[in-house]
Amino acid sequence: MEGKTPADAMSAFWAAAPSFAWFFLIVILLVVFRKEIKGLFGALGWRLKSGASLKIASFELGSAYVSANNVSVEVQGIESKPDQSGVRYEERRRYYEPNRKIMLVHKIAPSKQQNQLYDILLYLVPHGDSTLSSVQRVEYYFGKHWGNQIFTSIDRAQSFQIATSAYGSFMCTAELHFTDGEKRMISRYVDFEMGSIGK
């Protein structure tokens, strides 16, 4: 059996070269775009977790959507019944009344601060026919990781906004001080469940 000549070795090398080139190109693309790829898989995971529909080629997962009028047939384990006595309607209404229909809400975005996960913006939103004109100031409290400090916001034009950063979800309490001297305590659980949208 004759041995391979240098020409045969070179020929074999050049025959295999495209395969090596494709391999290295894929590795380079994975390294360069690793953040984008991670974000893509994170978004897909969030869609599955949230119950949104997902279709890839012939594979499809239905959405888990509840409309205002009826329950979608695609949702499993959900039943509905009318609130005939009106108890639940009244109970829900009572969540609005004590704080004069002033609600505490929040937004999150990936943090620009080192060692933090999200930047958070908290502020007030008036519900329905309510306004913020009756609010004089808001005293926010985030907990021991903020030094047990109470932070006061007096800027009505900016909806009494306050911003902070955090690496985990937390409870925010806010004491509303009204112009007539009354005070009301409201709260907001600052979760990161919508974080995938902001990435």
Image: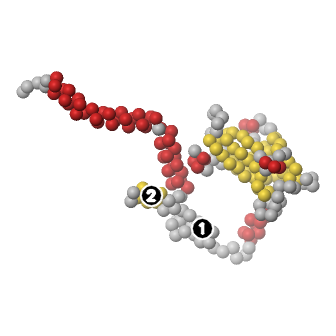
Image quadrant occupied by the C terminus? top right
Going 57% across and 69% down the picture, which residue do you hit?
A: 71
Measure the C-alpha gap from mark 1 to mark 2. 21 Å
How many residues crowd around disc 1 within 10 Å: few (fewer than 14), some, or many (20 or more)? few
Going 82% across and 44% down the picture, which residue do you hit?
A: 153
Asked if marks 1 and 2 touch (Cβ < 8 Å), the reply is no
Image quadrant occupied by the N terminus? top left
Q: Evaluate whether residue 67 shows in this view.
A: yes
How many residues crowd around disc 2 within 10 Å: few (fewer than 14), some, or many (20 or more)? few
Instruction: Tell which circle, 1 or 2, labels the residue nearer the N-terminal end.
Output: 2
Q: Amino acid at mark 2?
A: Lys
Pick the residue in front: 119 or 76.
119
Question: In terms of secondary structure, where does tag 2 sit?
Answer: strand
Q: Position of residue 147 (x, y in %)?
A: 77, 35
Pick the residue in front: 152 or 148.
152
- Name the side, left or right, on which 175 lies relative to 193: right
How many circles with numbers are drawn on the protein? 2
Q: Amino acid at mark 1?
A: Ser
- Name the side, left or right, on which 197 lies relative to 152: left
Task: Please name the residue that numbered disc 1 is placed on.
Answer: 67
Task: Please name the residue that numbered disc 2 is placed on.
Answer: 55
Going 81% across and 61% down the picture, which residue do you hit?
A: 130
Q: Is residue 177 above or below residue 10?
A: below
Going 23% across and 29% down the picture, which residue do you hit?
A: 13
- Name the side, left or right, on which 99 lies relative to 69: right
Pick the residue in front: 13 or 193.
13
Pick the residue in front: 69 or 24.
24
